[in-house]
Amino acid sequence: MSTRAFTTVAIAALALSACASIDSSPGGKRLASLHLFDAQSHPNFIVYVACSGEMKYETIQCATVSHAFHTWSHARNIHLDEIGPDDPLFSTGRPLGGASPAPSGEPYCVAIRFEPVIVPSMDTWSGTMGTMTSGTVPGRAGYLATLYVFSRASGALLRKLPLHAQVEMPEHADVTPTIKADAYAVIHRIDPAYPVP
């Protein structure tokens, strides 16, 4: 098991609630102060999403993440592009290739780096010869994400919000619904008015 997997399990107790509202969290309040939507609920931003897992079976879940973000962006008329996790946007405020092709007028660029986390269950053994006992550590599924808000005019980083959550999963359970819910939890941080499916 990787170091990240052990660390992820250790911080699970501190995980953010997948249903937390943007208005009920300190990070959410910081986002709300930017007015990402105008008085008529039109977006004042464009969005970029990067998704990649540490393991291949985690990266496969990026299709679920992509679908959730595209469904939301179409419903809310938000310009969305997918980028790589190492895109210079995350450090410079400018995507690879320079200025965004999105229509001018939106003052903000929202960038999300999303990492599905899937920790398989594992058998454990303890004791000494003749007194060995076994057990199982349940698997977990969730995500690590960082949400950035940049000024489109200057490229300056205005907000940076780390997000994470994990839940225990029964052995051989389908993790896709959990990862889908996690993607919508991140969307809900940006757009609490969006009805999460």
Image (tube, grey):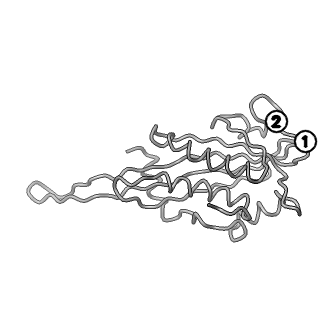
Closest to the observer, 70 or 26: 70
Closest to the observer, 87 or 65: 65
Instruction: Compute the Cα span from label 2 to label 1.
Output: 9 Å
Q: Which residue corresponds to the image point at 74% horizontal and 65% vertical from the top-left?
A: 193
Tag 1, which secondary structure?
A: loop
Tag 2, which secondary structure?
A: loop
Q: Which residue corresponds to the image point at 52% horizontal and 41% vertical from the top-left?
A: 53
Image quarter where the N terminus lies is: top left
Q: Residues within 10 Å of mark 2 (few under 14, many from 20)?
A: some
Q: Which residue corresponds to the image point at 83% horizontal and 34% vertical from the top-left?
A: 101
Residue 138 is situated, as x and y percent measured from the top left of the image, at 35, 58
The image shows a total of numbered marks equal to 2
Residue 37 is situated, as x and y percent measured from the top left of the image, at 83, 58
Residue 68 is situated, as x and y percent measured from the top left of the image, at 62, 50
Picture layout, residue 190 above or below residue 52: below
Tag 1: residue type? Ser
